[in-house]
Amino acid sequence: MTKRYQLPLRGALNPSTHRAGTNPGSFANAPQIGGPLAFSSPDTPGMPAPSEKTAWDFMPEDWTFDGERWHPPAGFEPKTQLEFARLSVVTPEMKRAAEREPHLTAEQIRDEIAAGRMVLPANKTHLRYGLVPMVIGRASRTKINANMGASPVSSGTEAEIEKLRWAERWGADTVMDLSTGGDLDATREAIIKAARVPIGTVPIYSMIIGRSIEDLTREIILESLEHQAKQGVDYFTIHAGVLREHLPLVKDRLIGIVSRGGSLLAKWMIHHGEQNPMWTWFEDICDVMREHDVTFSLGDGLRPGGLADASDAAQLAELSALGELTERAWRKGCQVMIEGPGHVPFDQIEYNMKLERRLCHGAPFYVLGPLVTDVFPGYDHITSAIGATAAAYHGASMLCYVTPKEHLGLPKAEDVKQGCIAYKIAAHAADVALGIPHTRDWDDDLTRARAALNWEKHFELSFDPDTARAFHDEDLDVDTDFCAMCGHDWCSVRISKEIAEFNSGKADGFERGAPRRSPALSEEQVRILEQRGNLPPEEIHRLAQKTKKAVAKPGERASCHSDFVEGDTARRIQQEKLVQLGRKDARA
């Protein structure tokens, strides 16, 4: 007798459009598009409740409310996506962003922006260069950011443009230029003109080129912001939440302040004995950013740099200050998202996400990782992707990637690829778990191809087809009805497909068709196998040239395939000719 279990279904949408397979659907909360719980996880007991306020509660003082809608003063000209949304205008950028979010309408995007729960970072200048508008918010799909930038000891403008192209290829939704060396101005200009994704910067880096941090003044801050805004930067990280009263809270940390912007401003405050200038002149900063519709990314200057300092008084005090800054920015008509930690034990991630949701009234949370352990340098794209998946499920809207070079050096192109892929995994996994419509359709199709043993479709649907094919052909470079992991007799997928009563492997449009020799490896696939080092050079060369005489003469079917020869014959040939491909001594 089959036992029935009471599943914790809460009304979430099914991420599979056609409810494929036997999965019951998401265990997340029912979606509330237009409310504080657009796509959200169930609360563990003790979690902070969402804020009851939105950007509508922090309107400019000269706007009036007639009981139904807000009205700006006479002669008002909207400058930002937030201001257009407040006036019920659907902009061309909102329409374009909606095309990229198939579960949302342009009107829903407008309303989320008006509530402050979504941002559309699109500097007017960058739009003229070819920026493709996108949105960041918990009602939309989870986004990822890739960091890059020249340092005083490594890289330059051309290398950064190459990394930009690489990041865009591997799925980065935004890119931050964090250059601290070389010609910062030229690098930034080149990146903006080349980028189709929004570009963010940390302007304080440029503010101190050629001067000490102690010399920073109001005029220098505003001039630098104005210059970068005119260049076309889409969002600025502004570390305005690090306050003088927070500095004593850092004294006993194991690793102090790990944010460059946070540490620089702490030094300025100690030297001058005054409050953070970014906090003091915040309204002036808003005026500059509003003029060009540059989105705030309010920086977490006191984020923890290790598990030992996570969720401490300094971090949470700054987060509270960021909530106040969010209100001030909204009153000035500026879009806002919030930056978050860093290094957080896995058990504390949900609390951090939901505390931000409350203190910052649902403004999009943009988190770095977080890393869930500190002892795997060289693998921090993995340690952080684990935390990033949880962060997105519990409320983060954008994930800042971490590469294998984190804490060790400046990432190169391959590091950028690995960081992007790790974070695309995290973002996609969270979107499926949240029940965002259509997000599992891709997974379902690849499962159908896998069930049908349709290798060509399998590779085609994979996120990185070159790596998938190279890994497959490293062991078994023929289109067989099994793979090298199990071989013919032990292939459960093949057996399931052969059982007439099962639907497995029989989906329309995913039939494998006649078996055929796989095509020659591409240059990228050759590079992947060379880097892995498991095959001798001559074997890789053979795979690239495809002189496949071992299993079939030209024009003949590969006789290792059990669809065309007796099982015993197929097993003998695969044992003698194919499985040996995976050995370095195959041609010794």
Image (spheres, grey):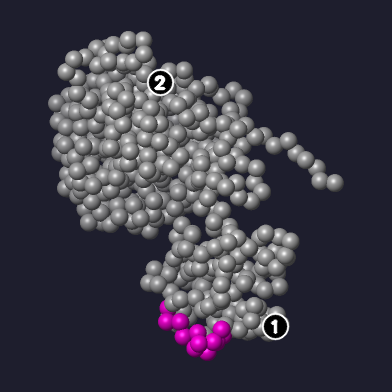
The answer, for residue 182, to whether it is visible in the render is no
Q: Amino acid at mark 1?
A: Glu
Image vertical order of residue 255 relative to residue 72, above or below: below
Residue that numbered label 1 is attached to: 566
State which quadrant residue 301 falls in. top left
Q: Quadrant of residue 212?
A: top left
Determine the secondary structure under disc 1.
loop
* First to last magenta residue range: 544-557
Q: Residue at x 37, y 31 (%)?
A: 107
Check disc 2: other Cα within 10 Å, few if <14, some if 14-19, many if 20+. Answer: many
Front residue (pair 553, 412): 553
Picture disc at residue 72: none
Percent x, y of residue 74: 18, 15
Whole-percent x, y for residue 56 in the image: 36, 18
Residue 563 drawn in magenta? no
236 relative position to 468: left or right:
left
Q: Position of residue 249 (x, y in %)?
A: 42, 23
- Is 14 in front, or is 344? 14
Which mark is first along the chain, 1 or 2? 2
Q: Residue at x 58, y 28 (%)?
A: 43
Q: Secondary structure at mark 2?
A: loop
Classify mark 1: residues with Cα within 10 Å, few (<14), some (14-19) or many (20+): few
- Where 583 falls versus 469 (above or below)? below
Number of callouts in the render?
2
Location of mark 2 (residue): 54
In the image, is 42 to the left or to the right of 409?
right
Q: Looking at the image, can residue 16 be seen? A: yes
- Please check the rendered image and state whether residue 551 is part of the magenta-colored stretch, yes or no: yes
